[in-house]
Image: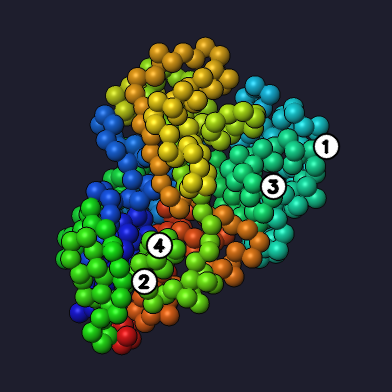
Amino acid sequence: MTRNGVLGGGALGLTVALRLLQRGEDAVLIEREPEPGGLAAGFRLGPSYLEKFYHHLFRSDTEATALILELGLGDKLVWPRPKTSTLMGGKHYQLDSALSLLTFSPLPLADRLRLGAAIAYLRLEPNYHRLEQITADRWIRRWMGPRVYTTLWRPLLQSKFGDRSSDIAMAWFWARVHLRSSSLGYIRGGFQQLYNALVAEIVSLGGEVKFCTEVKGISRGEPGKLCVATSEKTYELDRVISTLPTRLTINLTPELQGDFAARYGQLDSYGAHCVILSLDRPLTDTYWLNINDPGYPFLALVEHTNYMPPEDYDGRHLIYLGNYLPMDHPLFKQSDEEVLADFLPALRGINSAFRESWVTEHRIFKAPFAQPIVTVGYPDRLPPHQSPIPNLYLANMSQVYPQDRGQNYSIAMANRLVADLPVQPIAA
């Protein structure tokens, strides 16, 4: 029986392990954190789980939906249509439908119509390769117009990507528009239930799951074998699938350093920083609020309990304040007190009635390699799944291009990868 090692316990790694076991192979999954789920992992809050970093599904996320149904969680999958708005000039403008776009008063009517036509084109255009050799800012300026770019898109690109905003490829922007839906899917009670169910199914099929276990190195062993050294022991395996970031896999594998690292190890990513606040009352009537006004210390405010009911969290009103930033940004080193001292006063610009006494709890989560920087030429820098070392495969979030992250795309990659793997590994 083929013995597989799967490194990383997010959506991708868990699905890989499940599919390998379902086809009769053996698998051990190794995860550094104490729980499964990766960036979609949650924590207990009242009777439910809440994700450390905000998550939802789109109607186009068919492979995630299929996995949820396969694992018996379909009765908990709901599809609300929450409100999405933009903060501009201190006002909240709803922008989540054709009608709201037509009434978006910061733009003249001619620009609104031009914006609507460009969005319609991006939704209908199936071939993102047409858009790979141009940056998003150039394409938007040309086809949506300079006023649309300056008013709507430049603030969002700059707040998300900082000084890299003018480098972002239009293929990335296409993916943000092409597959999105107004209805958003969620597992009532939290996505952690999906990851717990995946672990339970892996174990029931005879697989092994090792939490709180850090990978220390990957090397060749006896003929036809790979060795994965961990903080607990060294595993001798027939095949290894690493779902860790490419740069980390290279750092762990001396044999990949050199030409392979020079070509594929330079992909840039930002880290995620997320403040979660529990309030004793609602802050807004909006689920997703893009922050287009300057001076705010976060790029988006996501009021989760305008999506799921507060009763799911013992009456708490829950807000995410999110950022994607270079991993050496000072915010990642600040104490909770320093972060809250910057963030809480800014909430009065969103709701002038806000008082810090409304906050009953807070949590702050940080994660590296959370937002790939997708620039022109990005596909040429993506490694193939099969590394130069026989039976060592790389599959991670950077490879879901032109998407850049998302549970569905990780699950889809896992399904494709396992379907393409030979039943018997080639001798190393």
Q: Residue 97 lies in what quarter of the image?
A: top right
Give 181 or 408, whichever is nearer the viewer: 408
Q: Amino acid at mark 1?
A: Ala
Local secondary structure at mark 2: loop
Q: Which residue is mark 3?
A: 119
Give 223 or 320, whichever is nearer the viewer: 223
Mark 1, mark 2: which one is toward the viewer? 2
Q: Amino acid at mark 3?
A: Ile
Give the residue at x 32% y 59%: 8
Mark 2–mark 4 distance (CA, rounded to whole Å): 9 Å
Mark 3 crowd level (few <14, some 14–19, many ≥20, 10 Å Cα): some
Quarter of the image for the C terminus: give it: bottom left
The answer to whether the residues at label 2 and label 4 have Cβ atoms under 8 Å apart is: no
Q: Which residue is mark 2?
A: 253
- The x and y percentages for residue 323 are 51, 39
Say left or right for 290 vs 152.
left
Give 141 or 304, whichever is nearer the viewer: 141
Which is more N-terminal, label 3 or label 4? 3
Give 386 or 409, whichever is nearer the viewer: 386
Residue 304 makes an appearance in the image: no
Q: Residue 201 lies in what quarter of the image?
A: bottom left
Give the residue at x 31% y 87%: 427
Say left or right for 176 vs 43.
right
